[in-house]
Amino acid sequence: MNNLFRWSTLINASLFQATWFACVLGSAKGLLWPAFACCAALASYQLHNKRRVESDLQLVALSVLLGLMVDTLWLQLGFLQFTDPRPVTAMSPAWIMLLWVGFALTINHSLSWINAHPLLPAVLGGIGGPLSYLAGERLGAVTFTTNVTALMIYIGIAWAISLTLLALVAKDKQN
């Protein structure tokens, strides 16, 4: 069982990383299908296990809501622009919503350890969120249109809150 857990965790983390790169690099090249394909593979793998499907789906719903609010806010405030071509430029693009879906599917699995300490989700979100956006900017998926330091602070705060909320929902479902 322990060996199975390790493989499952490794597969979950690997599929999420593939999803992240497919979303970001696909966006930079104007391609959405790699993001859909990788996110579908992650969802298919993770949701085939009936043990946490309800919790995973609740995390996905919350994550998409948070992502839509947060990333649309950055657009509306003029802090950044996503570089992909899309018909509705005032809202978060589909590929970033797929990133939020994929991320939600790690909370009960490869990131289940984040509930080891109550402050860990906030710290991880506060650091990891901005680093992810910086990497996305370097790879051409997003352009920052405001002071980068201030934007990284805002993104860090938003991600600290978002990951804390996701972790609390996951923890509540485990009890």
Image: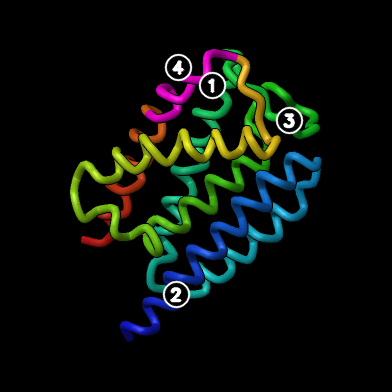
Disc 4 or 3, which lies upstream in sequence? 3
Q: Which residue is mark 4?
A: 150
Residue 127 image-quadrant placement: top left
Q: Amino acid at mark 1?
A: Leu
Task: Look at the numbered disc 2 and give the secondary structure of its residue.
Answer: helix
For numbered disc 3, what is the local secondary structure? loop
Q: Residue at x 67, y 23 (%)?
A: 81
The local crowd at label 1, few if under 14, some if 14 to 19, many if 20 or more residues have their Cα within 10 Å, is some
Where is residue 92 shown, x and y percent of the image? 63, 31
Which one is nearer the viewer's eye here, 29 or 93?
Answer: 29
Mark 1 or mark 2, earlier in chain? 2
* Furthest-front residue in this view: 138
- First along the sequence among labels 2 and 3: 2
Query: Majority secondary structure of the magenta segment?
Result: helix
Alpha carbon separation for disc pair 1 and 4? 15 Å
Q: Amino acid at mark 2?
A: Ser
What range is drawn magenta here?
A: 146-156
**1 vs 2, front mark:** 2
Of residues 74 and 145, the one drawn nearer to the viewer in this rendering:
145
